[in-house]
Amino acid sequence: MESQPSFEQLIKEDRATRDSKKWRGTLLEYLELVRTDPSHTRLAHSRVYDMIMRHGAHDILETEEPHVKRLYKDESVKVYDFFGDEFFGIEKTLSQIVRYFHSASLKGEESRQVLYLMGPVGSGKSSLSEKLQRGLEHLDPVYAIEGCPMFEEPLHLIPRHLRKEFEKMLGVHIEGDLCPVCRFRLKEEYGTRYEEFPVVAKYFSKRNRTGIGVVPPVDPNNQDTSVLIGSEDISKLDVYSEGDPRVLDLNGALNVGNRGIVEFIEVFKNETEYLHAMITATQEKIIPAPGRHGMVYVDTVIVAHSNEAEWQKFKADHTNEAILDRIVVVKVPYNLRLSEEVKIYQKIIRNSDFRAHVAPHTLEMASMFAILSRLEPSNKCDLMTKLKLYNGEEVVEKGKTKKLDVQELRDDTKREGMSGISTRFIMKALDNALSDNVEGNCINPINVREAIINMVKEADLADDTRKGHLDILQDVLHKEYLERLEKEITKAFVYSYQEQAESLFQNYLDHAEAYVNKTKVKDRNTKEELTPDEGFLKSIEEQIAIIGSAADGFRQEVIAYLWAGSRRGEKISYRSYEPLKEAIEKKLMTSVRDISRIITKARTRDEEQEGKYDAMVRNLLEHGYCPSCVDVVLKYAANNLWKD
Ligand SMILES: Nc1ncnc2c1ncn2[C@@H]1O[C@H](COP(=O)(O)OP(=O)(O)OP(=O)(O)O)[C@@H](O)[C@H]1O
Ligand SMILES: [Mg+2]
């Protein structure tokens, strides 16, 4: 076993790194730091943008995965590693967020607007906002005026009349003025010797309310702006005279979020007065100080979010126009790609205490339901086909891959991804399936589908929505799962499936090529010259309904396709050409379908059958089933598959 560091070692190392970043000096010393590295004075948006970009970005097409390439063709979509293994299938949303930070970092109009995330429940709005905050917490500390309740930029100490000169010497722009508390301290303690004012390095921290502020929706009857801008400490009002800043508690969310981020949760639940404070903070970069203390400069990224219904309600009210104009809306729809939806649940499970076995296809089937519920119907194809196309899969119909442009399908929709089943709903269903099967300690497609059906029946849904969901579950999904299950069990009966498929494929190629070129086939072993075996070719083609005159065309297509592939240096296998792959798999299955059916359904088996059955079960166990779910799915298959 690899030796682990001791606790003591870990603690000491951590302290050493933190200590090395501790810093306390004067403004004068800080100026020298800025001269060597002007990035210390970055404003909030630019800090967040750099934080994201530092992790790297690449084009989505720089991948080996053919289905991703198929999906994006020559569209240029960037993938940002900062969001990397936490967010799936919402690349467009992420790139809009990054674009916002990019133009804001260039001090464009965006830097004076609220970033507003709008999407259905459980689409990841809170998680996105949290991710940005966590990112800040991992950054190196920022330099701030010591003791300032708003951790303000030390350059604010430079008097106005000297700023031009300092800016020239430092190569930075100086923006903003001292807060009332620091202004008072400067006057009282340092007089004109502002260069001696102490400066410290401060880490961002959500819990300590340093550089990160959060505004939960507030009770509408009790909207007190102190949550945003702080308050006057009444007990001190007796001690100090009116207008003395020592009575100020600048601890509102907009105060503590200075230099970093302020998050507004369910933003439109708040009174308009509240929203005006938010807008002024971002648009003018100032907020009022409580009482009669003038205005305070703030520099922060405001991230707000809510669901679409609240957005629509807010938007419909004309009196809100001024606010609307100062908001950058980024839609956070549900993911619509099957492979990515599965990754979402894998992530949530990984981060939770969920410790049960997850049978093969379970998360796929649950994800399939979630996505089908989110898709808008199209007159070009059925929902399941759409799901597969959105997933970058090839759909074979009548021996041909379906030629439907994903982009066109998407363009036809209105608000696809903005409604349907949420990630949270599915997670609850997985939990429910597990509590119904505590002793098996395993969830599988069968108990999960049941759990979802029960939840849909109990959920507060419109009648036709409920009916739609149940149709998907009881019909579409049921069929899809049975198809997969039959394939899986039958496959488990075929000894060394992969080799057999490859050998059928090679044979097919040899014979089809000779047929097309009107030449002979050389037997690989005996070197005999044979005429192409048309009977054999047909036995494969008929699996996908290619018969009669269609066969010639199909053979030519196969050869041309694979030729082109191998010229591009692709490795050719039975999986290379989707229609042929399907034909070969079907052919292999047909050869064992009967014994598969008989043996699986049988109540009693003879010795030979018993041997085959055991081998099949072993095969399934090797392929991800556990003793509990293998039992469940085989019983299910016996009862539901191969019905006469
Ligand atoms: N596209 C996605 N990629 C990764 N995880 C996701 C995605 N969508 C949702 N999730 C996960 O689903 C869960 C719910 O998301 P979250 O709480 O962020 O949603 P929300 O949009 O804030 O919902 P609400 O409107 O109900 O507050 C989280 O664990 C989140 O990480
Ligand atoms: Mg949320």
Image (cartoon, rainbow, N blue to C red):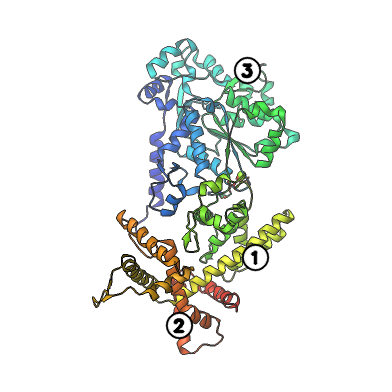
Ligand 1 lies under 8 Å from the Cβ of mark 1: no
Provide the residue designation for mark 3. 294
- The quadrant holding residue 331 is top right
Label 3 or label 2, whichever comes before in sequence order: 3
Label 2 or label 1, whichever comes before in sequence order: 1
Closer to the camera in the image, 337 or 517: 517
Marks 3 and 1, how far apart at CA: 64 Å
Q: Residue at x 55, y 17 (%)?
A: 183
Mark 2, Cα crowd under 10 Å, few <14 / some 14-19 / many 20+, is many
- Mark 2 residue type: Lys
Provide the residue designation for mark 2. 612
Q: Residue at x 34, y 56 (%)?
A: 565
Marks 2 and 1, how far apart at CA: 32 Å
- Mark 1 residue type: Gln
Residue 255 visible, this angle = yes
Question: In the rendered view, does 541 fall on the left or right side of 237?
Answer: left
Q: What's the mark number on residue 326?
A: none
Q: Residue at x 40, y 36 (%)?
A: 19
Judged from the image, the secondary structure of the residue bearing numbered disc 3 is: loop
Do the numbered discs 3 and 1 sit on residues whose CB atoms are within 8 Å?
no
